[in-house]
């Protein structure tokens, strides 16, 4: 199974935020979209950074309420780890675990093609395991 399989199931829509927007605007959008992170992009197709709800909380801890007026560019992660649609789900799961990343933008041909979360990866892996268990159960029943 590959990242492309996850994107087929969930879709390739990615919510992006401009780097010049405020953290207050970002927080509102995260709540309205009911998501945990946004890719930061000037044009909606490049990956200039990524910012998550965790970044906002850390910013609140460091800067207090003033963080709400700061720009997304000031808080975003600039060195973004990405994956491709051809990457295996097991590779992505390992990468997310090792790097402690919860959201990975999917890039194809230098352009944003989707985003996968740790929840997407776990859900897909559980579906794989359930299918394997069913196949083994059917095999065991058929051999009796």
Image: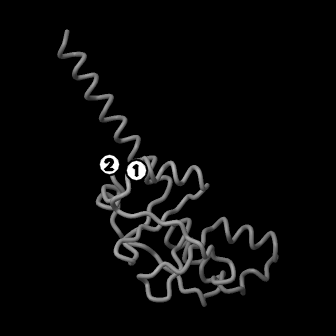
Front position in the image: 9 or 27: 9
SS label for mark 2: loop
- Looking at the rendered image, the quarter that the C terminus falls into is top left
- Residue at left offset 55%, top offset 70%: 80
Give the CA separation, mark 2 to mark 1.
6 Å
SS label for mark 1: helix
Comes first in the chain, label 2 or label 1: 2
* Residue at the extreme left: 142
Instruction: Reply above or below: 19 against 79.
Output: below
- Reading the image, the residue beneath label 2 is 1
- Reading the image, the residue beneath label 1 is 89
Instruction: Reply above or below: 16 against 114.
Output: below
Side of 120 where 137 appears, left or right? left
Using the rendered view, name the quadrant where residue 25 is placed. Answer: bottom right
- Residue at left offset 54%, top offset 86%: 18
- Residue at left offset 30%, top offset 55%: 5
CB within 8 Å, label 2 to label 1: yes
Front position in the image: 64 or 18: 18
- Point out residue 76 in the picture as x, y percentages from the top left corner: 63, 76
Instruction: Reply above or below: 122 against 66.
Output: above
Front position in the image: 31 or 112: 112
- Residue at left offset 17%, top offset 16%: 142
- Point out residue 13 in the picture as x, y percentages from the top left corner: 37, 72
**Colour scheme of this structure image?**
one colour
- Point out residue 71 in the picture as x, y percentages from the top left corner: 67, 86
Using the rendered view, name the quadrant where residue 85 is placed. Answer: bottom left
In this figure, what is the number of numbered marks?
2
Task: Tell me the crowding category of disc 1: few under 14, some 14 to 19, or many 20 or more residues within 10 angstroms, Cα based.
Answer: many
- Point out residue 134 in the picture as x, y percentages from the top left corner: 28, 29
Instruction: Reply above or below: 24 against 122.
Output: below
């Amino acid at each position: 199974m590959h990242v492309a399989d996850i994107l087929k199931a969930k879709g390739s829509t990615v919510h992006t935020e401009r780097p010049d927007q405020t953290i207050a605007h970002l927080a509102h959008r995260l709540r309205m979209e009911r998501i945990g992170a946004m890719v930061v992009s000037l044009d909606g197709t490049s990956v200039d950074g990524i910012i998550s709800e965790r970044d906002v909380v850390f910013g609140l801890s460091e800067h207090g309420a003033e963080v709400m007026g700061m720009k997304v560019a000031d808080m975003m992660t600039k060195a973004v780890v990405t994956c491709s649609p051809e990457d295996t789900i097991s590779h992505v799961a390992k990468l997310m675990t090792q790097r402690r990343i919860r959201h990975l933008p999917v890039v194809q041909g230098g352009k944003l093609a989707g985003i996968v979360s740790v929840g997407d990866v776990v859900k897909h892996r559980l579906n794989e395991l359930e299918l394997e268990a069913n196949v083994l159960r059917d095999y065991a029943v058929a051999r009796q």
